DNA sequence: ATGGACAATGTTTTT
DNA sequence: CATTGTCCAT
């Protein structure tokens, strides 16, 4: 029996509940929720807007709402759509829902906007101008395509910077503007418009979509094809959206279409945490929501469960300076807590030293575990100094950032091979690998190849496959003998990989490609760097292993859609280094925000744009509100841009913080160098931050460490300390221990007479 | 076609 | 300064 989602009244909720016996009833879905949260979870059908301050339990509300719909209202999971912005957020929600409902939740559509759109587009490709095995182009590919488009139109890529043109195209897509609709006011607009048109043609010729296309095409499909729209609109009785303030117009429109039949849209967001305007997100969607859906029920969540009052007061002092916002009064029952600290360092290395010192001493005093810390910064470039400091101190850390892995040359190469096999029309990938490793195929050959393929109306990859099949006859005049042989050999390789791809797993295909191209000898030149490169390829191989029972397409898709945040693995007990953007949605007991200098935070590029400045402020606010127990801010007297250190002013945001909310500290030179000296003599390069994306189940060190990170140990000579890191290497457990008296030591567990201390 | 040397150029944030 | 692109010699 199924309860039709109609009028939701409490009394009915229980009677029509087909799972009551197993689930224990309504109360379970409301247990541990405050009255506002309960109101949100139990709100009736129709549009619902939940304005959720930081740490107010919005994920909780979302997951409980879904559980409530399924468990108490009898809505079938297949009729619920829930969208998030990161895979991590989606997985977390899935985990929580499953723990509440178990199998009863299966069939739910839950995923990121992008992944959900990909699924729809593949399914509906018959209505669209591309095939269902399309590939997803990342930013590098996009840039390459813009360059190609500029070249095709005979434009100078010096005069029209590809990145600038791409940004304009991306904005247009986010606004759902087709090339023909691109607004032209200047000559440059005219150029962009033409490039945009050509760029779209090229994408289709490559059977590829870029990130923006995923939303763009789905939204257009729904607006222009009533049959398809109806299908999804009828199916999804309930639609729930996380981080609604980050939606752009394409996403807003998309949602509007999907809920056009049932109108049950439940969105959660916070305008104060809108930090993606530069990517097209428009927090005014939150305000527009109430206009578009006048019967919206609004629920305000103000109670914070994360931070101490000091931290909240500081956060409010910062954000209250932004105009045009409804002030929220964040409050907590956690008590005052400790005052946030502001540290003034000599330069960025001084900041890093302060971070390391503070972390080490809090760990040594047993007040915190390594995993309790996060260090946040405005720009990725700032991580370098911090990483160096962590390595030097021999402290393991984890770094958030997909770029770190998927942006690597060797990884891009291997993925390009896979993409080419999957989709021979992908000319960008072809261009990347056709001469990697070198096969004597250069620019001139490529030009001939392109014109030849164009003449026969094919993509270069398809042309090559044809060459592999029919042999080189007839092309002797076009290419020299050498080159023709080289091309044929390469073409036969692709053809044979394609045959493998049809039957074999992504893993064995990858192995075959690596073997056939002798890729290892190409990148692993015996240097340390070469070895690291090969290790990275092996890491990718490990990832491919998880796709034994799925296809190459799934593998490529997942690889294309990972976000930085997704690379954050849980359960590693080490401090986290991440940008303020990547920090959204996360929380840590101890938070450092470094680089509070004018020009860095707020970033200099925002100075002359009031909207951008407000966003910088929100970014700072997001960082502050990640902290649970302690917050440490720091700025440097000198900051180096392009090598030269120059005096830098403290962030103007600091001036908005009342003195009584901040404890101030200045650089202390003595104590730092004393500790630093002791560490340097023990210095050994740690391997932290190397392993990207996922846990590595097949890693050679599977044995459980006897002294796991976080454990307290006693050494007969060095006294008491805390384990910071432990790994098994050559059947030997290597343990990094921070001793209260000595600082960091690295020992072999079998040699040092360590004693585990409980508690 | 390839690889080396030099020059220019630029750093926000990312699904 | 550190990466990326361009020019030139092999």
Image (spheres, coloured by chain):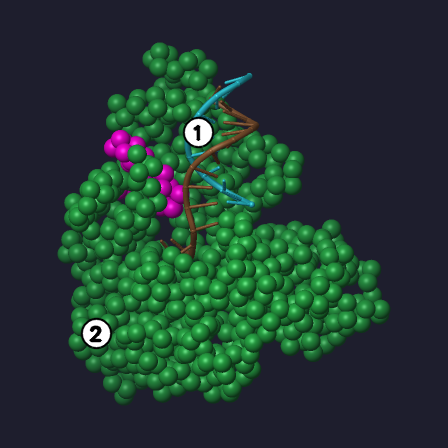
Chain colours: A green, B brown, C cyan
Is residue A38 at all visible to an observer of this figure?
Answer: no
- Residue under circle 2? A290
Quadrant including the N terminus of chain A? bottom left
Q: Is residue A612 left or right of residue A630?
A: left
| Residue at mark 2: chain | A
- Residue under circle 1? A434
Which residue occupies 38% across, 46% down? A139
Q: Is residue A100 left or right of residue A43?
A: right
In the image, A461 versus A352, the foreground residue is A352
Indicate whether A541 appears above or below A28.
above
Q: Position of residue A372 (x, y in %)?
A: 58, 71
Q: Position of residue A419 (x, y in %)?
A: 41, 39
Q: Position of residue A668 (x, y in %)?
A: 65, 69
- Which region shows up in magenta? A129-155
Indicate whether A70 appears above or below A521.
below
Q: Position of residue A447 (x, y in %)?
A: 35, 24
Marked residue nearer the N-terminal end (1 or 2): 2
Quarter of the figure with residue A487: top left
Within 10 angstroms of label 2, few (less than 14), some, or many (20 or more) residues? some
Quadrant including the C terminus of chain A? bottom right
Which residue occupies 63% across, 59% down? A390
Q: Is residue A573 left or right of residue A307?
A: right
In the image, A702 versus A634, the foreground residue is A634
């Amino acid at each position: 029996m199924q309860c039709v989602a109609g009028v939701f009244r409490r009394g009915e909720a229980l009677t029509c509940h087909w799972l009551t016996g197993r689930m224990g009833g309504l109360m379970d879905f409301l247990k541990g929720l405050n009255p506002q949260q309960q109101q949100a979870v139990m709100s009736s059908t129709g549009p619902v807007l939940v304005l959720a301050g930081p740490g107010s339990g919005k994920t909780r509300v979302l997951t409980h709402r879904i559980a409530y719909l399924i468990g108490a209202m009898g809505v079938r999971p297949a009729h619920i759509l829930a969208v998030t912005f990161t895979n991590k957020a989606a997985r977390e929600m899935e985990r929580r829902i499953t723990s509440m409902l178990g199998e009863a939740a299966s069939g739910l559509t839950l995923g990121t906007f992008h992944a959900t759109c990909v699924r729809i587009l593949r399914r509906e490709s018959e209505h669209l101008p591309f095939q269902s095995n399309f590939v997803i182009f990342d930013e590098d590919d996009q840039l390459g395509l813009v360059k190609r488009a500029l070249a095709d139109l005979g434009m100078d890529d010096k005069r029209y910077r590809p990145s600038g043109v791409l940004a304009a195209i991306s904005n247009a897509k986010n606004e759902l503007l087709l090339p023909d609709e691109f607004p032209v006011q200047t000559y440059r607009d005219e150029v962009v418009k033409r490039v945009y048109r050509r760029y779209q043609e090229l994408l289709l010729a490559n059977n590829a979509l870029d990130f923006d296309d995923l939303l763009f095409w789905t939204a257009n499909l729904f607006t222009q094809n009533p049959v398809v729209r109806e299908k999804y609109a009828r199916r999804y009785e309930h639609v729930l959206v996380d981080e609604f303030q980050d939606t752009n117009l394409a996403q807003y429109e998309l949602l509007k279409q999907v809920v056009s039949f049932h109108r049950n849209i439940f969105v959660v967001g916070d305008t104060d945490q809108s930090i993606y305007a530069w990517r097209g997100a428009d927090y005014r969607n939150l305000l527009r929501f109430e206009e578009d859906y006048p019967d919206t029920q609004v629920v305000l969540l103000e109670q914070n469960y994360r931070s101490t009052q000091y931290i909240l007061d500081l956060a409010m002092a910062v954000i209250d300076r932004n105009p045009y916002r409804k002030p929220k009064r964040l409050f907590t029952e956690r008590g005052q807590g400790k005052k946030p600290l502001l540290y003034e360092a000599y330069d960025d290395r001084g900041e890093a030293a302060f971070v390391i010192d503070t972390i080490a001493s809090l760990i040594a005093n047993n007040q915190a575990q390594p995993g309790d810390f996060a260090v946040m910064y405005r720009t990725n470039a700032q991580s370098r100094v911090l990483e160096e400091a962590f390595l030097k101190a021999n402290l393991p850390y984890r770094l958030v950032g997909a770029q770190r892995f998927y942006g690597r040359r060797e990884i891009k190469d291997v993925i390009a091979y896979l993409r080419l096999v999957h989709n021979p029309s992908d000319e960008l990938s072809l261009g990347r690998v056709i001469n990697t490793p070198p096969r004597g195929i250069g620019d001139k050959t490529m030009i001939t190849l392109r014109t030849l393929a164009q003449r026969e109306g094919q993509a270069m990859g398809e042309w090559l496959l044809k060459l592999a099949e029919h042999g080189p006859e007839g092309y002797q005049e076009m290419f020299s003998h050498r080159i023709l042989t080289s091309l044929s050999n390469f073409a036969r390789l692709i053809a044979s990989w394609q045959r493998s791809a049809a039957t074999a797993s992504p893993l064995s295909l990858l192995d075959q490609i690596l073997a056939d191209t002798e890729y290892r000898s190409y990148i692993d030149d015996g240097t340390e760097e070469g070895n690291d490169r090969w290790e990275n390829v092996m890491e990718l191989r490990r990832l491919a292993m998880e796709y034994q029972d799925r296809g190459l397409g799934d593998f490529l898709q997942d690889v294309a859609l990972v976000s930085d945040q997704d690379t954050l693995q849980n359960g590693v007990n080490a401090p986290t280094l991440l940008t303020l953007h990547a920090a959204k949605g996360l929380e840590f007991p101890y938070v450092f925000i470094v680089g509070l200098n004018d020009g860095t935070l707020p970033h200099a590029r925002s100075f002359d744009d009031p909207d951008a400045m407000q966003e910088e402020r929100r970014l700072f606010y997001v960082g502050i509100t990640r902290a649970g127990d302690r917050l440490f801010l720091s700025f440097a007297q000198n900051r180096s841009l392009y090598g030269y250190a120059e005096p830098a002013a403290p962030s103007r945001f600091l001036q908005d913080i009342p003195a009584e909310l901040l404890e101030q500290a200045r650089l202390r030179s003595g104590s730092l160098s004393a500790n630093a000296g002791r560490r340097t003599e023990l210095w050994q390069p740690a391997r932290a931050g190397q392993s990207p994306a996922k846990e590595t189940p097949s890693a050679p060190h599977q044995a459980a460490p006897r002294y796991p990170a976080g454990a307290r140990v006693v050494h007969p000579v060095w006294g008491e300390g805390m384990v910071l890191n432990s790994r098994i290497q050559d059947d030997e457990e290597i343990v990094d221990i921070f001793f209260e008296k000595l600082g960091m030591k690295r020992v072999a567990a079998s040699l040092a007479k360590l004693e585990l201390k409980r508690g």
